[in-house]
Image (cartoon, grey):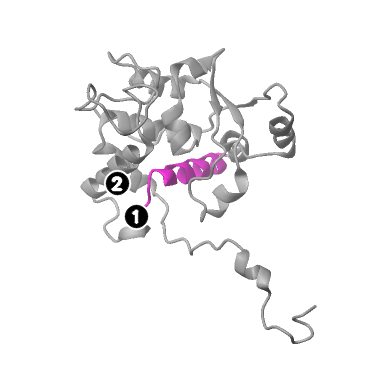
């Protein structure tokens, strides 16, 4: 009303809207991610493989536990927070409860994750200072910190020289593995929306009411495109 009458030149409410910067981050290519994976430590290779097969976020990958595997499914109660707010896809989707069927391809990755380290987490490692106090609060001493994963992934990207023409904020992160996975599921004709765990009205009602969790059962729609690395 005040704008139409010429009393002000702009809408004051516009100033309160959250602004998102133009996305500079580039997407992974299969060739690039394969090169990154080839120079990564084993635990990071496993994390990349799990992200590719399941389309899950970084936080959900490192939170996966062996106890989440039951009745032939990997149960993922996704975090409700959005890690990359400027990513429109992430901003719109939210989180959900997903039961991913453990097929032969996923089982191979899970088998590779098993070692002589007794950890409740599927993705885990033993650090150099594992017996010493740390400022980072962990549920278990073998748990991977999300920032550590991010830094190690970036180190692998630089070591592999997978994206020589990209610099700074353009370099794709571990988060972007999810985008490539979703693209591959879509290309394979599978329901990328279902496996990614997009929020639906029904799931919103479940969160609000506190009723029994309703799991979305999904199948993995792709095979890993990477060559085995020893």
Q: Report, in whole angstroms, how far the alpha carbon at label 2 lies from the one at label 1.
A: 8 Å
* Element on which disc 2 rests: helix
Q: Which residue is mark 2?
A: 154
| Magenta span of residues | 171-188
Residue in the picture at 47% in, 42% down: 178
Horizontal side, residue 7 vs residue 160: left or right:
right
The crowding category of the residue bearing disc 1, from other C-alpha atoms within 10 Å (few below 14, some 14 to 19, many at least 20), is: many
- Whether label 2 touches label 1, CB < 8 Å: yes
Identify the image quadrant of residue 99. top right
- Assign the N terminus to one quadrant of the image: bottom right
Horizontal side, residue 118 vs residue 191: left or right:
left
Q: Position of residue 17 (x, y in %)?
A: 61, 63
In terms of secondary structure, what is the magenta stretch mainly?
A: helix
Q: Which mark is residue 112?
A: none
Task: Name the foreground residue: 218 vs 133.
Answer: 133
Residue in the picture at 72% in, 24% down: 211
Q: Which residue is mark 1?
A: 171
**In magenta segment, residue 63:** no
37 lies above or below 26: above
The answer to whether residue 32 of the structure is visible from this angle is: yes
């Amino acid at each position: 009303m005040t704008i139409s009458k010429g009393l002000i030149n702009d809408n004051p409410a516009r100033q309160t809207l959250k602004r998102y910067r133009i996305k500079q981050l580039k997407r992974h290519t299969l060739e690039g991610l394969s090169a990154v994976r080839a120079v990564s430590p084993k635990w990071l290779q496993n994390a990349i493989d799990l992200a590719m097969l399941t389309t899950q976020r970084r936080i959900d990958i490192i939170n996966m536990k062996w106890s989440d595997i039951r009745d032939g499914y990997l149960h993922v109660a996704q975090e409700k927070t959005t890690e990359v707010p400027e990513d429109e896809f992430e901003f719109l989707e939210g989180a959900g409860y997903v039961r991913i069927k453990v097929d032969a391809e996923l089982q191979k990755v899970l088998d590779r994750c098993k070692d002589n380290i007794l950890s409740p987490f599927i993705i885990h490692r033993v650090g150099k200072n594992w017996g010493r106090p740390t400022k980072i609060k962990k549920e278990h001493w073998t748990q991977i910190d999300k920032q550590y994963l991010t830094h190690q992934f970036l180190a692998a990207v630089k070591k592999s020289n997978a994206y020589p023409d990209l610099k700074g904020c353009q370099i794709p992160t571990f988060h972007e593995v999810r985008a490539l996975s979703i693209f591959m599921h879509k290309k394979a004709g599978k329901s990328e929306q279902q496996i990614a765990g997009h929020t639906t009205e029904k799931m919103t009602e479940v969160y609000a009411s506190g009723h029994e969790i309703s799991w979305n059962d999904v199948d993995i729609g792709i095979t890993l495109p990477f060559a085995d690395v020893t």
